[in-house]
Image (cartoon, rainbow, N blue to C red):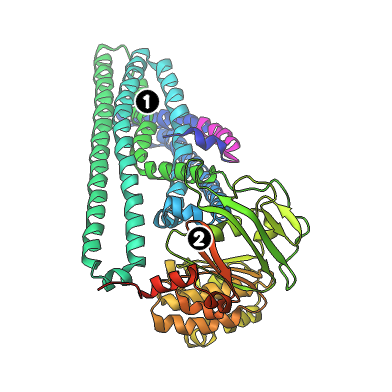
Amino acid sequence: MFDQQLLSIPGIKPLIGKLSGLAVLQALAIVLEAVFLARALVLVWQRTKIADLIWPVLSFFVFFAFRYLITRIENQMTETFAARAVARLKSQLLHQEFRLGPRMVREIGSGHVVTLALEGLDQVQNYLNLIVIKTINLAILPWLIVAYIFYVNWLSGIILLVMFPVIILFMVILGLSAKAKSDRQYAEFKQMANVFVDSIRGLKTLKLFGLSKQYGSNIYRVSENYRKSTMSVLKVALLSTFALDFFTTISIAIVAVLLGQALISGTIGLLPALTILILCPDYFLPVRDYGDDYHATLDGKNALTEVNAILALPTPHSQISLTKFTNWTATSTLTTRDLSFRYTPDAAPALAHLNLTIHGYQNVGIIGKSGAGKSTLLNVLGGWLEPTKTPAALVVDGQAVDSLAQATWQKHISYIPQHPYLFAGTVAENVAFYKPDASEAELQRALQQAGLDQFVDSLPAGLATRIGEGGRGISGGQAQRIALARALLDQERTILLFDEPTAHLDLETEYELKQTMVSAFHHHLVLFSTHRLHWLSAMDYVLVMDQGQIVDQGTPAELQQHQGDYHALVNEIRGEHNVD
């Protein structure tokens, strides 16, 4: 259960040292607690005066309270450590998600990314809160207790020492089975999260094509698989609990029988016999606690492994720093020189030999069939993908660089996908995502530019109105307006990247949103990927892509004047060449 990856968490080694010292004190308190309790029971058995009981009983309660205080201190330390570690992991995960961009969601799955960032990190916190203290107690408490038992009666110590590895062996065997089943359960959970989120997002389209019931059956099948894997894990957990209780009970019973025989034969006194018998449950308590929490922490361990795997993913980086760029202005230029990109060395080019130049505050439309390379181009220009290693593939304001994966460029970018993610919180918190310290006046300005001011005024608590995780409680059009307000709030972000932002909206909602968005394009460089042809009327320049290449480009008026790839694509989208 204690994984090697835990040692890489900052602050865990000092925590282990402190908990180890507290565990030694706790073992001392347990022994003295047992000694004074046994002494009080012996005095009662001997029918001594009540006055003689005051000292052992009072001492018992003192060490009992001392043990409880140590436990509280240990729990407080581990809770504080777990909360800080998870907060650090959450920050690292969010920064990694930004550095990887849409590529991360594509490779891992949006449902799993969201679930991992929310529920998964809660499981990690529970794992960290339990694993360190349970491991330290298991490594220290039993051995100090059994050392004292050896001192009192060597035969009882041998029995307890022999039974301990037997219990550990059975726990290892059952633990390996539980781990295999838990890994399968976690894989089913990831699949269920991805299927569920993707199905909910595409529900309107599924209903339009009459496929909602089919996908409902698919969700039922995936959730049923997850239920079965969960029940399988619970069966092993119950079996391991039974085995642990059985062996510890048998061990204590054997010690009790031998102590009884020794008492009858007179080879041991009542006080040491009672002390040993009282210490036996505490001797097995750490391994019982460890076994009971093993299954509760498996999900947290798997989630931590997933988080570390994401953090270890290679992020795009540039060998040539963009030093001269400060912000995109009306005179800025971006040029690509023979720009190419492959997702893997053996794959076909996703982008092949792209040459284009973008000037100032242009609205650039990118159109093409699905798989033509539109999103890939946006990801390369956003700095989330590195171009194929060709020197100086990109030129920004006269400075040649090999990649745009650098902070001086990306801090001026706002990315708006089809489904912008809204987290559980107030409207103000969601709008201020890029600029948490924004004033209320700045928020109102962004809301007005995004056409949200009337909607927010109609809410019972205005900007303080809370919305659900994933935007529950608001429409898709309102979610897109919040994403637009995010982009407009930070005046430093003058580059807007749109990847099919209205593909899931109905035409009426899209038309209303279009009026707002077009008016917000002023004083921004806009790169707008879309399948909807009516957006081209708002574009200054259009790129037509096919199989990773720019097959046609120019202003909408220029493209209309000649019969080329643009006309062929428009006719295909409109279905003018379809045969009944």
- Crowding at label 2, few (<14), some or many (≥20) Cα neighbours within 10 Å? many
For residue 375, the mark is 2
Residue underneath mark 1: 275
For the residues labelled 1 and 2, the Cα–Cα distance comes to: 72 Å
Task: Locate the C terminus by quadrant.
Answer: bottom left
Residue at 42% x, 33% y: name it.
Answer: 52
For residue 90, the mark is none
**Residue 265 drawn at (x, y percent):** 25, 11
Residue at 54% x, 51% y: name it.
Answer: 93
413 in relation to 297, above or below = below
Residue at 70% x, 52% y: name it.
Answer: 401
Which residue is at the front of the view, 476 or 535?
Answer: 535
Horizontal side of residue 356 vs 202, given as left or right: right
Q: Which residues are magenta?
A: 10-24
- Using the rendered image of the protein, determine whether residue 387 is visible from the camera's viewpoint: yes
Horizontal side of residue 457 vs 398, given as left or right: left
> How many discs appear?
2
Q: Amino acid at mark 1?
A: Thr
**Residue 192 drawn at (x, y percent):** 31, 54
395 in relation to 252, above or below = below
**Residue 301 drawn at (x, y percent):** 42, 41
Q: Quadrant of the rendered structure where residue 509 is? A: bottom left
